[in-house]
Image (spheres, grey):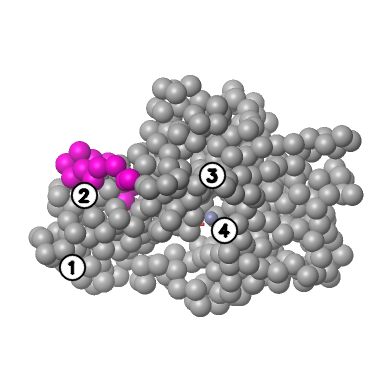
Amino acid sequence: MLRLVIMLVLGIESSCDETAAAVVEDGKRILSNVVASQIAIHERFGGVVPELASREHLRKIVPIVDEACQQAGARLDDIDAIAVTEGPGLIGSLLVGLVYGKALALSLRKPLVGVNHLEGHIHAVLLQNTMEQQEGKPVPTAGFPNITLVVSGGHTILYRVESHSSPGNVTPSFSYRMLGQTRDDAAGEAFDKVAKLLALGYPGGPVIDRLSKHGNPRASEFGRIRMKGNQLDFSFSGLKTAVLYRVRGTPLAAEAEERRAWREASPDKPILEELRAHCSQATLDLVASFQDAVVTDLIERTVAAASAGGIWTVFASGGVACNSLLREHFAKAAEEHGFNVFFPSLRLSTDNAAMIAAAGYYKLATGHCDDASLNAHASFPLGTTLV
Ligand code: KG4
Ligand code: ZN
């Protein structure tokens, strides 16, 4: 069994539109964390184009891994193990990172471990917390069991996460139970689609987050999102359609078309102030109300999961966990309900390979190792499901 001898894990992540590599020591200290974003390539399509993503991963994977090693001051030979995302994600994208990771492991004769991307997002929170404690920051310990909300462009899932220790091994292992998930669009996907409809740019989450600060979330309220059956499931497609109905055939639609033409004619991506100047107050109110509805729903269901399980620790991770209103309202809810809420830094919330290296470290240290038969899976649920 591989134990604490493993020190440096090279993480590789390529599940969607970010080619990422990182070197992490003992699952706790980031030595490098390099991310090559493909936003500029997918921007004009308003979403990720899978074929373009795979091709770009192919171009970037070797230089990005080299850069991660260089920044960590490590040669490939110094790496003790390789952790690579095996799913879920775009199959062509996943395969690029996975095959490269496998080839590296084989040629360097190093252990290889496949990591679930969702497990990586959960570990990003732990990694952040450990780093802050190591830096001497007075932060509480991100403990277990906890309720984790993974919320990104591809996923909106609630997990109950537990840690387990085993005799003779100081490193814990983790188990995951899925409590609820989106039945249609992921929250980040809804942000991206609403931004596309209103010609606000891509990705939609960050731009809606910033513009919403200038809008009134009460001006165009959407009401609660109602679910039949499991109350810990999510649904955002109805909300997205409700935005469409408030735009179609109104002056907001003509305004969005003008904005689209203006953006297409501009050689550079507009800065926020320019974009804001091209938005009416009604558009700003609409995006603020949409964001408020998404954030309220995410927090209410997460708090319900925590209360139902008698759990006092909440993690939130994934690209949408960068949202400033989500962070602010989660902090208020935590104070009100008496739980602790933990987020990764913004850089560790979005897709990155440090979270894959950290999750991989714990798997390796508790005896998991994969061989050359490791394969990529577009659909790859994490843990067990509540029945
Ligand atoms: O985790 P991530 O980098 O990739 C996926 O696994 O999907 O998340 C990307 C998603 C996009 O949909 C993006 O619009 C959203 O995260 N996002 C945000 C914010 N920053 C990124 N959504 C809301 N507010 C933000 N500040
Ligand atoms: Zn992700």
Give x and y (percent) for residue 9: 75, 52
- Residue type indicated by callout 1: Glu
Please report the bounds of the magenta region as a residue range.
208-226
- Residue type indicated by callout 4: Val
- Residue type indicated by callout 3: Leu
Cα distance in 3D space between marks 1 and 3:
41 Å
Give x and y (percent) for residue 91: 58, 71
Q: Which mark is residue 179?
A: 3
Cα distance in 3D space between marks 1 and 2:
16 Å
Callout in the foreground (4, 3): 3
Classify residue 124 by image quadrant.
top right
Q: Residues within 10 Å of mark 1 (few under 14, many from 20)?
A: some
Circle 1 residue: 257
Q: Which mark is residue 35?
A: 4
Cα distance in 3D space between marks 2 and 3:
31 Å
Cα distance in 3D space between marks 4 and 1:
33 Å
Q: Nearer the viewer, residue 140 or 340?
A: 340
Mark 4 in CB contact with mark 3 (< 8 angstroms): no
The response on whether ligand 1 sits within 8 Å of label 1 is no
Helix, strand or loop for disc 1: helix
